[in-house]
Amino acid sequence: MRISSRSEFWLKLVAVVGLLIGALLRCYRAYALVLDPDEALHLLPCYATSLREAITYFRQDAHPPFYSAVTCLLRPLLYSEFEARLLAVVAGALLPVILYFWLRERIGLVGASTALMLTALAPSLVEVSAEVRTYSLALLFTALTLMWFDQGLDGLRLDRLALSGSALVLGILTDYSVVIVCPAIVLYGFARLWEIRAPRRIYLYWACIVLLALGTFAALYWFHIRRLGISPSSFGQTWLRDGFRQPGQPLIPFVADALLKQFSFITGTIAHGALLAALFLLALPAATRAWRILLLAPFVTGVVLSLLDLFAFGRSRHSSVIAIVIAAGLGLVAQRWLTVRSRILPLGIPLIVVTCFMLAPDDRPHEEPDKYEVQAMHDAPEYIASVAPPGTFVLATGQAKFLVDAYRAMTKKPPLPVETVDNWWSEPAQFTPALAQFRQRHSVPQNEPILFVEGGFSSFEFPHSKPASPLRTFGSIRVWAIQEYGNATPAVSPPSPPPR
């Protein structure tokens, strides 16, 4: 049923306001927060002084190289946290617009406006598009793939199908999470071709695009994934453990929990996630075969990948790409159920969306903006340089090194001479041999303290017999002067340069 022109005007107006609010929220978060180790690792290739150094950073990153390659092109602009996050902010602000134009033609104005409001204001999507991360750009490429594909079928336009295939390949090159929606997009494509009785040449064209996508995954596996030296299941022992089935965990409760948590990632709470899931299910009865495939296949793929220990699925940004499917499903529900015999009802859609999650208490941990912490993180490399005499090497955890190098590069200064205890996660058992090797390698006497830097996502635990405190703390970066690990309090004076 067509809504009145007056309701259509107000609905578009409210959607534009929601879009602007979402863009402002992204800018605020991007401006106010400090970098974390993941973001620093994404940035470091663009600050590399040589191609060899950039490739080294690429190999350390567990994400495909496209996002970091783009940041290399934007290097002259990336000298503050906000500038570094601008690519993700723009991608996140464009995502609701692309979904709107796609769904307006496929399901109608009410459904498109609902999807726009959801993706513009969802707290989780605001967060991932206000960070130096690949997810926001991957979401944008996925939405472009679907929009250009359907536009290509409307007039059997090969140029639009080519754009769709290009966006799909770029999405795969941006983030591995696109693997969750790739089977759905492929099957949706063939189902749509069957619906419109497309000519054989269109089938062949889409099949070539599918083969190109498979070839891209194969190339990434051969040249990147297998060289990382880690298995996806190893993340099951970290904070991502809820995204994998643990030994002894019953199958059905795990699957139900993973699906519910995926919806709660959008809303922020389990209760509101359950409400969102119930509304999503209402879209299935009236959906066509192609739409049912698009709505259900990503969840099946995510659960299967998780059960095979190949990819985490659940309440984390690593599977945030599925938000496009959730938004499309809720758009279908709104289009069917909220456009009946009323001029006012369509205008309640934004209020319903906002009530579902924006007013809910978000029970996920969030980093709150702190302007003093931002300045402190910038001060950390300068302090380390001031207390480490020329020629002195510094020992650090892998995450701390990425942070120090990134903030040092932002000020256009060369990296400090830092050696790491680990590549990413630090365990106490690693530290004792690393400390001994560091002393031996740089001829540091046993009675001389060593400057040690740690920080990032986790706090390094020092099992000292007496309380210990770092020399200085700069946000998430802590600087220690370590003399002996395990049974002595850290020294309180900066280290002297090692003998030459």
Image (spheres, helix red, strand yellow):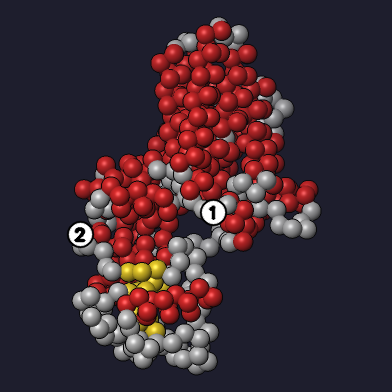
Foreground mark, 2 or 1? Answer: 1
Residue occupied by mark 2: 412
Give coordinates of residue 23: x percent, y percent. Answer: 38, 45
Q: Earlier in the sequence, mark 2 or mark 1?
A: 1
Residue type at numbered disc 1: Ile
Mark 1 residue crowding within 10 angstroms, few (<14) / some (14–19) / many (20+): few
Q: Residue at x 63, y 22 (%)?
A: 290
Q: Is residue 7 visible?
A: no
* Residue 230 disc label: 1
What's the CA distance linking mark 2 and mark 1? 33 Å
Q: Nearer the viewer, residue 425 or 94?
A: 425
Q: Nearer the viewer, residue 34 or 394?
A: 394
Compared across the picture, whether 270 is left or right of 401 comes to right
* Residue 438 disc label: none
Mark 2 residue crowding within 10 angstroms, few (<14) / some (14–19) / many (20+): few
Compared across the picture, whether 216 is left or right of 306 comes to left
> In the image, is residue 488 above or below residue 480?
below
Give coordinates of residue 334: x percent, y percent. Answer: 60, 32
Q: Nearer the viewer, residue 141 or 65?
A: 65
